[in-house]
Image (cartoon, helix red, strand yellow):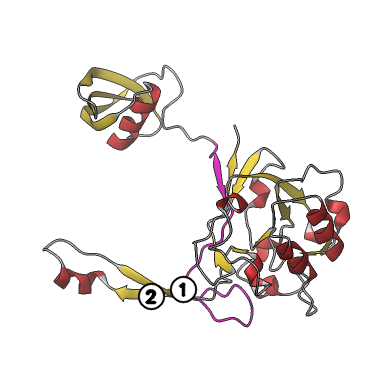
Amino acid sequence: MSNRVKFDFEIDFTNGGGIQGQDFRLDIDGNDISDQELADYIVKDMRLLMVGQVRILNKEIISEAHKRQAINSPVDSSYIDLSHIIHDGLVTYKGLPATIVCDYLTREASRGRYAPGTEFHIGKIEMVTNTGTYVDSPFHRYADGKDLSEMELEHFVDLEGIVIRADYRKGLAVTVEAFKGKEIRGRAVLVHTGWAEHWATDAYFENHPFLTEDAAIYLRDCGVKLVGIDSHNIDDTRGNARPVHSVLLKNEIIVAEHLCNLENVPDEGFAFTAAPPKVKGAGTFPVRAFAKIQG
């Protein structure tokens, strides 16, 4: 026998009035569902506007056959996180200092500053801007290039995306051939090499996949908006030249490095976002990068 939830509800509207419901029954997965989940479902399912407080009353879980799909059944997420976790001790780039995540104000110390029962935590982070999953703006490469505070949101948010599959096991160099025959103009071009599987290991730093200069020139000429990769660097770090950064950033094409989970993103049909803080004087900063799947 499946579970259902039986409950009453009261809904207030911000412009006055309200509605009530008694003995509602809905199918659920599992043995419980929160009041908040029920409230959110009712408001959405009934297409209510100007909703104020929602009260769930007399909630009871009962055993009864399902009438339709459970309201809290697992569904494929519309969002796919493409970012690594930043934590204390993280080293993103060999030779740069590890991240320090610590307390500035502990909960215990805060208790003396606030009313009884009230406490807060204020953290402190010390890190280089090239930490975790991050984006580069032109200022990262060029002294007269735009820094993060000067780049419009259109460079980072809701970009039509495409994933280019370039398995590192078939070769480290991602050449122009990987992008030919693809619809890339005006898009965020994300290169999936599979190298993210080495994240947090010494292997991640050496002999990693990269784009070639001719690939960067081709992407520039095709008018892409952003180029990302799930590798240690978009350039070949075995030498000192950085032609891919140079070509892309000179033309205000954002670079996103150290992506992950690209294997879970479809080749097309998604929007990509990787928005950094609006920092003056910085050309690089960590982001929460994600793909929004277009249903």
Residue ID for mark 2? 102
Residue ID for mark 1? 88
Residue 79 among magenta residues: yes
131 relative to 30 in the view: left or right? right
Q: Is residue 266 visible?
A: yes
**Among the two numbered marks 1 and 2 on one chain, the one whose residue lies closer to the N terminus:** 1
For the image, the number of numbered tags is: 2
Task: Identify the mark at residue 149; answer none if there is no mark.
Answer: none
SS class, disc 1? loop
**What is the magenta range?**
76-100
User: Where is 293 relative to 216, above or below?
Assistant: above
The quadrant of the picture occupied by the N terminus is: top left
- Residue 5 lies, in percent from the top left, at 31, 26
Mark 2 burial class by Cα count in 10 Å: few <14, some 14-19, many 20+: some
The quadrant of the picture occupied by the C terminus is: top right
Q: Nearer the viewer, residue 52 or 104?
A: 52
